[in-house]
Amino acid sequence: MRYVAGLDGGGTKTAVTVAEESGRVVHRFSAGPLNLNGQDEASVKATLHEIAANVGHVCEGGLGACVAMAVGAAGISNPTVSGRLTEGLREGGFAGRLVLVGDHETALWGAHEGPHGMILIAGTGSIAYGRNADGTVHRAGGFGHLIDDEGSGYSIGRDLLSAVVRASDGREAPTVVTELVYARLGLSTVQELVGFVYAKERNKADIAALAPLLSAACEAGDASALRIAERNALALVDTASAVAEALGLAESGELALLGSVLLQSSQVRAAFEAGMAARHPRLRCIDARRDAAHGAMLLALSEL
Amino acid sequence: MRYVAGLDGGGTKTAVTVAEESGRVVHRFSAGPLNLNGQDEASVKATLHEIAANVGHVCEGGLGACVAMAVGAAGISNPTVSGRLTEGLREGGFAGRLVLVGDHETALWGAHEGPHGMILIAGTGSIAYGRNADGTVHRAGGFGHLIDDEGSGYSIGRDLLSAVVRASDGREAPTVVTELVYARLGLSTVQELVGFVYAKERNKADIAALAPLLSAACEAGDASALRIAERNALALVDTASAVAEALGLAESGELALLGSVLLQSSQVRAAFEAGMAARHPRLRCIDARRDAAHGAMLLALSEL
């Protein structure tokens, strides 16, 4: 029996799916994060060794029976990152075929159970990606939180904080966003808020973590929150639309919606779907069929 | 003869104006920057000692004849900052009255040759500030580049970079901003641009330094650039308008326009003035009458 494995390496955990060469899944498990741009070289290696060992355990015939592995992770186009991943898995005893791709690639494979179709991810960051039947790929967005990624959790969190300071000095009407943000962060003044935002230890995930507050503010009918939802949704429409147009899929394609913003913020999701329907009436928005670890496994399978 | 001195402490230099108590200016000079949130404690002290010595030289009767000094600098509400400033000037031998205020306060005094009126500053950051005849003050904006400061040089620089990446993947039409930014930074691909933006050593001034490219792009009639000018100008209208409304000056006030964006980007300036005229037809936009060092000197004089 031959096996393949798919890895979805993320900042909080790595999801792994192991399947027989028939495609039948035999095991799923999670391991530690793959912080490939982080400092903890040793823990990344330990995670990769542990994954190799676990795959070996569930394959009849041991790790040698696993003939292909695909790994999706952010930043993998960096040769240092791909080199460290390869080294870690080889040291762990994996000797089969190894395919390293960006996490949007494995998300696409999972969402559509294959290499064709489009995905829009709006999580901490945002990106659209797709491949048509000709094999042409296109990506839009995903240039990071400082100059791009509108529609992402970071963008929404930043917009919520901006709404608080704008309401504080009269540029905007008072907004319930203020009390929601203050309650979440345990603050009570705009000075404290500024202290929070510009603290040295602050990172983009801290800002993105505020995004879920948008829903409650929208449900309260707050004008500022509704504008934020609308603006971010329309930015996501631009992003997805650019991919659909570039691939000739605007009239016929399927777009899978992924990421915490699209899955959890019903207002952003609704505004996005309305915006897409207005621009591309025949394009269908769907939920992902499978997760990225499953997608990675299918990609590994396609390499046999 | 008694004298007063005004200091405008900035990140690149400190401008100093010394006057007789009649208000007649007797000397102006520049000294080093006051990097009050920086590490170079020794150079800040050296600058303050040098300033005290220079003031002493130009006052008949020496530094003892200088009876009041006002200093405007960013971040001065921080007690550590004000403590270090005070200590440096006292060690330098200054024994007169010392007034420490934010740099927007001295800018206001300079722009209007007194404490009343409004200013809008759009430089690396953006802020509006004013004081009415009742002595009520109001400020809007100025909450920093991450969540605020639309209309600032940072905001415009970021929008230009965003336009480049958006044009690169088809979210926007091709824009001359791309070639202007690439030429300025010596880059030729969007990957290199991303490398520039997220480099560890990058700071907000590097991004703000791109803002002057907006003018050339607007002059070429570039749609993306014209949108950036318009959006940032309207954000500045919101900021200035909030101050005018809060102070009851929307129908009668004078607003002085300051900072590199308003002084050098004719398109932003024009769009701003048009937006203000539409919202507050009777409010007058003017150029600053004097600089912030002169303003600080006038503030010092008012303390006699």
Image: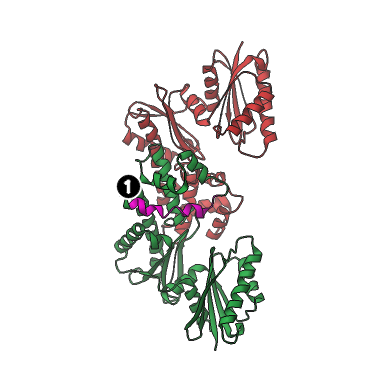
Chain colours: A red, B green
As for residue B176 lying within the magenta part, the answer is no
Which residue is painted at 46% across and 49% down in the image? Answer: A159
Q: Give the vertical position of A44 relative to B46 (above or below).
A: above
In the picture as drawn, the residue positioned furthest to the bottom comes out as B1
Could you say where residue B95 lies in the image, as x and y percent from the top left? 63, 81
Front-lying residue, A133 or A204: A133
Could you say where residue B247 lies in the image, as x and y percent from the top left? 41, 70
Residue with the mark numbered 1:
B223
Helix, strand or loop at label 1? It is helix
For the stretch drawn in magenta, what is the main secondary structure?
helix
Q: Give the vertical position of A118 relative to A208 (above or below).
A: above
Could you say where residue B51 lies in the image, as x and y percent from the top left? 59, 74
Q: Is residue A250 left or right of residue B130?
A: left
Q: Quadrant of residue B54?
A: bottom right
As for residue B208 lying within the magenta part, the answer is yes
Tell me which segment is drawn in magenta. B202-218
Query: Is any part of residue A270 visible from this angle?
Result: no
